[in-house]
Amino acid sequence: MKTLLDIVARHKRGEQAGVYSLCSAHPRVIESAMREASASNAPLLVEATSNQVNQFGGYTGMTPVDFRRFVLDIAQQVGFREQMLWLGGDHLGPNAWRQEPADVALAKSAEMIRQYVAAGFRKIHLDCSMACGGDPEPLPEATIARRAARLCAIAENAWHEAGGEPPVYVIGTEVPVPGGATESLGELEVTRPEAARATIQAHQIAFADIGLDAAWSRVIALVVQPGVEFDHHKVIDYRPNKAQALSAFIADDRQFIFEAHSTDYQTAPNLEALVRDHFAILKVGPGATYALRETLWGLAAIAHELPGGAAQEDLRATAIEVMRNDPRHWRSYYHDAERETLDLQFSLSDRIRYYWPNPRIKQAYESLLARLRGVTLPLTLLSQFLPHQYEAVRAGRLQADVDALLNEGIALALRPYMRACGVPGSQEY
């Protein structure tokens, strides 16, 4: 990950340099991100989480080596160069097994992280912040750090066996809830500089205690809370003045930048301000699949209005039916029965993203795209249901075919991240 280390060094020299991390397993989202990166001759960082991908398959059914193969297959299909693809592991620790006794959960975490590194993942977020069965709550900082150091040692051994570039690491305990908050949010408390300092110091001691000084030199970032988050229908925007002390704390550190989670739905100026203020790794996940869903709903509406369209299967109705029949991925998030249909489709937490691989939804999705391929899509319907793409078509920047329209819808959510990270040539529209 020398190139990522170079980005950190450039940022430390005062450049508007950063990297965004795409946390998604949807092939169309990954394809769109690769096409955008190719257009700017930029690398792309794709990350998988411990719940999503692990040695037991996670909720995607993929192991780390499966996920690598899955992403590389997409890269081959779109002509994205393998050397420009970076793979990362997010929240690698006992989160998926936190209900089990700590020794069992950590043993499973160790095997998971071994498989990630052996499969070629080289950006590793060590997250041992959660209490496991039998642990006190909250966990003491020193315990979190010792557990992270133990997992780092596993990662280092796996790298020595596998070869290739050495891993870089991210630490940090102030991690927002993955996928967005489960209830309405008010103001957020920004991480205090003294808390950030204590986390770094505790981890440095824990690494040194087991002879990981070389690995410590490759710890590049600390996960903190800069005051950004989203719930079902609201976004907590970044306020630079509230994060001023935290930003100033890391500015003088020669090694560390911050990694910001839950930056989905932030405005383009907010993303640029985050990178400027040293939150130079920006994570996005639900925001990208939300853009996918939004575009698909527009395409479904266009298909419905075309001659004979009302008699065809409705992707939206199919998705809602499947989600209601299998509520395991959203029941703990959506609690208002009167707004259930609204939340299932439109919530910013985008729990629908867990259902795209469902065979019925996948068939309806593929059927929709197949019906619209080769069809001349009226500008009037594009204007009505996909106004951003309509503007690009009218300006001659985009072809009015269904695959280009869908890729563009996703790209609209990703380009602000590229621009915020100083990617040369990233498109402005």
Image (cartoon, helix red, strand yellow):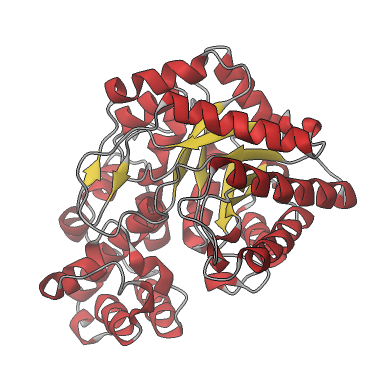
Image-quadrant location for residue 199: top right
Residue located at (42% from left, 29% from top) = 420
Of residues 170 and 284, the one nearer the viewer is 170
Q: Is residue 18 visible?
A: no
Residue located at (31% from left, 87% from top) = 325
Q: Is residue 131 above or below residue 326?
A: above
Q: Is residue 254 left or right of residue 333?
A: right
Q: Is residue 99 left or right of residue 93?
A: left
Q: Is residue 196 visible?
A: yes
Task: Residue 136 in the image: state x and y as whole percent.
Answer: 50, 56
Image-quadrant location for residue 353: bottom left
**Considering the image in quadrants, where does the C terminus appear?**
top left
Residue located at (66% from left, 49% from top) = 147
Task: Residue 194 in the image: state x and y as whole percent.
Answer: 46, 25
Image-quadrant location for residue 351: bottom left
Q: Is residue 47 left or right of residue 187?
A: right
Task: Residue 386 in the image: state x and y as whole percent.
Answer: 24, 55
Task: Residue 130 in the image: state x and y as whole percent.
Answer: 51, 55
Residue located at (54% from left, 67% from top) = 133
**Considering the image in quadrants, where does the N terminus appear?**
top right
